[in-house]
Image: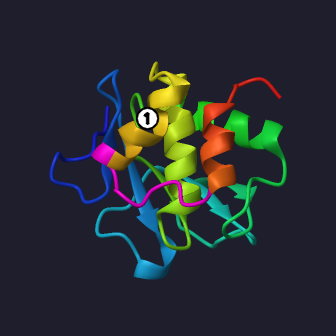
Amino acid sequence: MTAWSDGEEGLLRLPSGRAIRGRGLRHGPPATAPEFGLYLVAKPPVVGWDATWVRWPDFRLPSDRAAAAAAFAAALRRSGDERVEVACGGGRGRTGTALACIAILDGVPADEAVAYVRRLYHPGAVETPWQRRYVRNFSSRP
């Protein structure tokens, strides 16, 4: 099992004890490379590790909600024994939304997921009203 160190910047600890790093791609390369990355941007990024890309325009919602739900589930599953990161351009809106959905999959009630991610990841996570609604209504099924 390869785990993040507790001092890793942007780390969200889930109720199960698993940890996923949130990050903004605009902030440059990470100090520690993940083993798997979930990237929520308009175009696929070029990275040197295993990755999944979900088309997700800035300040919007994922273009394919079923693909996004499957990617969230994969990130959670892989976080059990790999260093997993979730990232978008700035690391707050789309990343926070995805982290909140992953937290729901890990047992956080949907109506508490935004507050959970804002408290433990970033106070500005999940930026728009429609992102908050998406989290509140999130289901792993399409």
The part of the image, by quadrant, that contains residue 133 is: top right
Q: Is residue 81 left or right of residue 62?
A: left
Element class at badge 1 = loop
Residue 141 percent location from the top left of the image: 77, 23
Magenta region, residue range? 119-128
Q: Amino acid at mark 1?
A: Ser
- Check disc 1 and report the residue beneath it: 79
Q: Quadrant of the C terminus?
A: top right
Q: Is residue 107 magenta?
A: no
Is 60 left or right of 106, judged from the image as shown? right
* 67 to 108, vertically: above or below: below
Residue 66 in the figure: left or right of residue 111: right
From this view, report whether residue 139 is shown above or below residue 130. Answer: above
Rendering coords of residue 58 (x, y %):
68, 70
Residue 121: in magenta span: yes
Residue at the image position 25 percent from the left and 60 percent from the top: 9
Q: Is residue 52 visible?
A: no
Q: Can residue 118 be seen here?
A: yes
Say which of 100 and 34 sits in front: 100
Is residue 27 placed above or below 32 in the rendered structure? below
Q: Which residue is farthest front?
A: 129
